[in-house]
Amino acid sequence: MKIRDIALAALASTMLTATSVPAFAAPTTLKWAHVYESSEPYHTCAVAASELLSKATDGRYDIEVFPASSLGKEVDINEGLGLGTVDIIYTGQLFAGRSFGPIALGGAPFMFRDFDHWDKYRNSDLFGEMSKGYEEASGNHITSMTYYGQRHVTSNVEIKTPADMEGLKIRVPNAPLYMMFPLAVGANPTPIAFAEVYLALQQGTVDAQENPLPTIQAKKFYEVQKFITLTGHISDALMTIVGGPTWGNMSAEDQAALDGVLDETATCASDQIIQKEKDLVQWFKDNGVTVNEVDRTPFREATMKLHNGPDATWDQATYDQLQAIK
């Protein structure tokens, strides 16, 4: 074979290879924003999701996670979903309720009898209907629900009965339904952004705050609060939401892959939070914090009077459907 023929054969082979093997394409990196610390399971499980998503989509997508309000406060990142400035967020049900009121039901105080009631709700037809209603109202897509833990009160005064909370200035997240429990017991709810709570407690801007035990540990609130009262007033959860622009630009195959990965991530974080709740009461006691177990009944009874009052963003039928879950 002549040199010319060899060269032509090599060129043909190169062209064949080039047309049969696609050029390498960099993955699309999804921005996942949240307001929690990098040490918390919500974050570490989300970071691990990147490799899972890359495998599930053959390298078409991966994830970069932005913790601790680095892309904005909770209100900001919720707005960012529709703008396309963030692709995925963790957010509370009460923040999602700003777009579709009924979905806030699961984040209201004393709405669930116990963990089992909450767990059945997140897998219920009712929650499926709520998620669909939210998507129609906001354009964004809920994929998963992560257990956030039971919310308890920390304070610098001892609390044993609802009367002990009379006039107490307590920080709550900036969503109206978080005020229901403090108002029911005569406290003074004060909305403050999550990233600013430690300083507000340290400086005495507020006397108390409320969060699950793992969050109280991660945000070091126990350093500036003497007492933890196990009110368990909200069985709280975080929803994982994908922005409408991002979800709409994905193929059905990649949507299914992302859905599955985010469900795995929710399970990863939920399992760790459940275990932490079991371990942390003794941990706080060992670190010099007074932890009070109280009779929750009077706190619950005071709050339930407000469940279907003027602040409710759901109707009676939806409330009854939730309470009927066994």
Image (tube, rainbow, N blue to C red):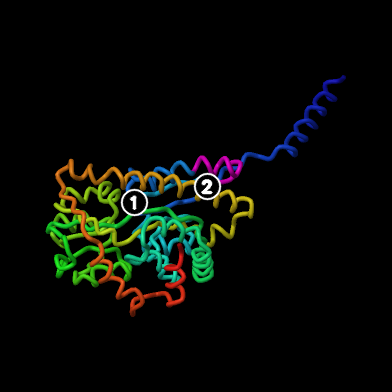
- Whether residue 174 is visible here, answered yes or no, is yes
Q: Which quadrant holds the C terminus?
A: bottom left
Q: Is residue 176 left or right of residue 132?
A: left
Circle 2: element type? helix
Residue at the location (22% across, 58% down)? 153
Q: Is residue 277 left or right of residue 62?
A: left
Residue 36's disc number: 1
Above or below residue 7? Residue 316 is below
Callouts 1 and 2 close, C-beta under 8 Å: no
Between label 1 and label 2, give the one nearer the viewer: 2
Which range of residues does the magenta coloring cover?
Answer: 50-61
Residue 290: image x %, image y %?
15, 50
Above or below residue 154? Residue 268 is above
Residue 261's disc number: 2
Is 40 in front, or is 71? 40
Which residue is outermost to the right? 1
Residue 131: image x %, image y %?
50, 64
Q: Amino acid at mark 1?
A: Tyr
Is 177 in front, or is 243? 177
Residue 138: image x %, image y %?
49, 68
Above or below residue 48? Residue 247 is below
Q: Quadrant of residue 56?
A: top right
Label 1 vs label 2: CA separation? 20 Å
Residue 31: image x %, image y %?
46, 51
Q: Earlier in the sequence, mark 1 or mark 2?
A: 1
